[in-house]
Amino acid sequence: MTMIRTFIAVPVPDNVKKHLFGIQRVLQKSGIGSDIRVSWSKPSAMHLTLKFIGGIEENSIHDIQVCMLEAAESVQKFELETSGIGGFPSMSRARIIWVSLNGLESGGQKKELISLAHRLDTILDAKIGIKKEKKKYFPHLTLARAKRPMNLNRVKREFSSKSFRVSGMTLYKSTLHPSGAIHEKLFLSEFGN
């Protein structure tokens, strides 16, 4: 059986991708990546990961779709907005540069996203044995990855925000290439009104 690399994510609208690309340009102009090799995320491939699954047999796709539908059963569409930038594992030793997300309506919608990720993780583990994440889910959009840690403490952290509607989650196939990963949509599970 053929193995494929997969993940489940919220698609990011084109206007938000354009906004994130603008933030990348500002960071590049500020000198990020001038002394350390940095791989900038391609705007066309940006997404909000809910669950990285990794390698699965292709015949498992239907079981994952069923789990996605169950996790999305009671979820209503909601709004998120981009916020400031941060770094993993910390701002002073960042290897990943990201943009955080806030929910509109006093963060309640960010809680909905976190709850969805947890519910999806639990269902995938219980129904088909895809192991639960050990780390707490932290919603973010990755802007760049660095080969070595870098200090982001002097970098501008606040940018104008961009809101977007979350209306579903998508199962993606990810194929690795020397020029970067190619993501192919396999299945969309839409949320209610």
Image (spheres, grey):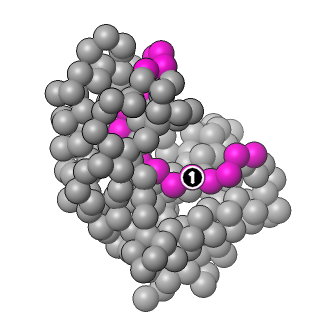
Q: Quadrant of residue 38?
A: top left
Location of the C terminus (image quadrant): bottom left
Q: Which residues are magenta?
A: 134-150
Q: Is residue 131 left or right of residue 172?
A: right
Q: Is residue 55 above or below residue 132?
A: above
Q: Residue at x 21, y 27 (%)?
A: 30
Which percent across, then down, holds residue 81?
A: 35, 64
Q: Which residue is identified by label 1?
A: 138
Residue 137 counted in the magenta span: yes
Closest to the observer, 81 or 42: 81
Q: Residue furthest bottom?
A: 193
Q: Is residue 22 left or right of residue 127?
A: left
Q: Is residue 57 left or right of residue 112?
A: right
Q: Residue at x 46, y 76 (%)?
A: 106
Which percent across, then down, holds residue 6?
A: 56, 45
Res. 191 in view: no
